[in-house]
Image (cartoon, grey):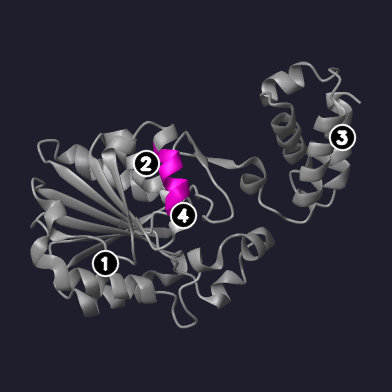
């Protein structure tokens, strides 16, 4: 069997799925340990039985809606290849808006010594990107030991582990006041679980069935319990933070009004702005002037 025949065999297996041919090419490329470009440039190249078995096994899993990122073992975020597995949420393009705003804030104040706090780091996508893009220090927290293990691997592979401290614990619990010494600006970012089970039902099957539920769903009420708890923790610790502190939160666009009300209740004097994503939907909540 050659590469082209193997691609077609997997595409046939995925015929009921959108992007069947694209997925088939990616899976065969992965099994052959070659780029898509090389794969397509030499479709007549024979493949070994081992490669056929591996590619077909991946194809059968994809037919059952296992996410491509889990099958390949990686996902690109901000142009960087990140390891992902079943223990971490797959990084989303929407989250890049969160990072872009943080980078913009730093670029406005280059004279400041900035500390980033990435709460609920997961794969480390946000923390690693911030470190790589700004060369500033990052403290990244997560309650999951397995997630932190993935995040540390990513930081090492992308050579930013010297800029990031990973701390295990819930929300702001691992964050100590001593961490702020020497910094005159703190930017706190959070992409916490914010879906309700009702909102989750609108997600693709591969998300609902395979991504870690605890990284997606907060509660059955409004989905904002973790954000609410984190902001309450921040108010209790606020005197430890520099005066120049800003908070950035990723939300589901359908929660914008509820989030605004929640923030006004907890931080009545805060300045609130909500930034849109590429679809012009409210995505990033920016809080300042507490």
The C terminus: image quadrant: bottom left
The single residue placed furthest to the right in the displayed view is: 1
Taking 228 as reference, is 49 left or right? Answer: right
Is 103 within the magenta? no
Q: Which residues are magenta?
A: 148-155
Which residue is the site of mark 4?
147
Q: Are marks 3 and 2 in contact (CB under 8 Å)?
A: no
Q: Quadrant of residue 64?
A: bottom right
Residue 3: give x, y in percent of width and height.
Answer: 83, 25
* Among numbered discs 4 and 1, the one appearing first in the sequence: 4
Q: Which mark is residue 20?
A: none
Q: Residue at position x 34%, y 67% from top? A: 170
- Mark 1 and mark 2: Cα distance apart in space: 21 Å
Q: Which residue is mark 1?
A: 173
Discs 3/2, front: 2
Relative to 154, residue 253 above or below: below
Q: CA distance from mark 4 to mark 2?
A: 14 Å
Q: Could you say which disc has been placed on residue 8 in the image? A: 3
Tag 2 secondary structure: helix
Q: x and y percent of residue 48 in the render? A: 85, 25
């Amino acid at each position: 069997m050659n590469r082209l025949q193997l691609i077609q065999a997997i595409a046939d297996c995925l015929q009921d799925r959108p992007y069947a041919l694209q997925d088939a090419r990616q899976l065969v490329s992965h099994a052959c340990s070659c780029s898509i470009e090389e794969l397509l440039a030499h479709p007549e190249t024979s493949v070994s039985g081992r490669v056929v078995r591996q590619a077909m096994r991946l194809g059968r899993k994809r037919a059952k809606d296992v996410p491509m990122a889990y099958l390949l073992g990686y996902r690109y975020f901000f142009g960087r290849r990140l390891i992902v597995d079943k223990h971490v949420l797959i990084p989303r393009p929407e989250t890049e808006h969160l990072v872009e705003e943080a980078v913009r804030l730093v670029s406005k104040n280059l004279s400041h010594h900035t500390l980033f706090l990435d709460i609920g780091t997961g794969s480390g996508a946000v923390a690693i990107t911030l470190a790589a893009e700004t060369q500033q220090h990052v403290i990244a927290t997560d309650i999951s030991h397995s997630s932190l293990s993935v995040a540390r691997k990513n930081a090492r592979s992308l050579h930013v582990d010297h800029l990031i401290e990973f701390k295990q614990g819930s929300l702001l619990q691992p964050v100590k006041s001593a961490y702020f010494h020497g910094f005159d600006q703190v930017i706190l970012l959070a992409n916490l679980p914010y879906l309700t089970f009702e909102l989750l039902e609108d997600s693709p099957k591969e998300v609902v069935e395979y991504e870690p539920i605890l990284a997606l769903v907060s509660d059955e009420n409004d989905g904002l319990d973790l954000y609410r708890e984190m902001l309450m923790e921040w108010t209790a610790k606020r005197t430890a933070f520099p005066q120049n502190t800003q908070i950035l939160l990723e939300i589901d666009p359908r929660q914008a009004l509820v989030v605004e009300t929640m923030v006004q209740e907890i931080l009545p004097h805060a300045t609130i702005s909500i930034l849109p994503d590429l679809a012009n939907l409210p995505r990033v909540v920016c809080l300042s002037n507490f």
